[in-house]
Image (spheres, helix red, strand yellow):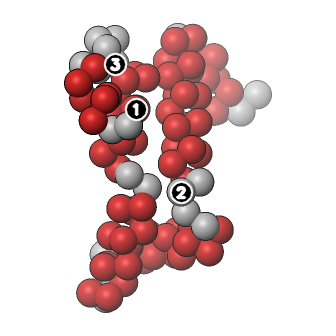
Amino acid sequence: MGNTDLVIQRLPFFKILAIAQVVLLVRRHLRGLSRDERRRMAALARHGTHLTPDERAELRTLVGKLEPRAFAVGAANHISPVPVPRWLLGRLR
């Protein structure tokens, strides 16, 4: 049994469920990009802080297509024990 298996076994079930829901949410948001855009975003992200101004602008554009605010609210809604207010969820649809 690997170290990862041991960590997962010790996590409460609801935390594992929350992680799975967030992973599915990430997947749904990533579908907003084409395969080439996903690859380009990954390449830019790997360079970290060593990006040119044009590359930074390109990364901002790609991340913007992912609807980061909608993702953040959706993730908070899945993880938080307190429901996200309906007015905030409604603004994202």
Q: Nearer the viewer, residue 61 or 50?
A: 61
Q: Which residue is mark 1?
A: 75
Q: For the residue labelled by badge 3, is the local secondary structure a helix, a strand or a loop?
A: loop
Q: Nearer the viewer, residue 49 or 3?
A: 49
**Could you tell me which residue is drawn at 52 percent across and 68 percent down?**
42
| Residue type indicated by callout 2 | Gly
| Residue type indicated by callout 3 | Ser
Binning the other alpha carbons within 10 Å of mark 2 as few (below 14), some (14 to 19) or many (20 upward) gives some
Give percent across and percent down for residue 52.
Answer: 31, 88
Q: Nearer the viewer, mark 3 or mark 2?
A: 2
Q: Which residue is mark 3?
A: 80
Q: Earlier in the sequence, mark 3 or mark 2?
A: 2
Q: Earlier in the sequence, mark 3 or mark 1?
A: 1
**Could you tell me which residue is drawn at 49 percent across and 18 percent down?**
15
Q: Is residue 44 above or below residue 14?
A: below
Q: CA distance from mark 3 to mark 2?
A: 25 Å
Q: CA distance from mark 3 to mark 1?
A: 8 Å
The dot on residue 32 is 2
| Residue type indicated by callout 1 | Ala
Q: Nearer the viewer, mark 1 or mark 2?
A: 2
| Res. 73 visible in picture | yes
The dot on residue 20 is none
Binning the other alpha carbons within 10 Å of mark 1 as few (below 14), some (14 to 19) or many (20 upward) gives some
Q: For the residue labelled by badge 1, is the local secondary structure a helix, a strand or a loop?
A: helix
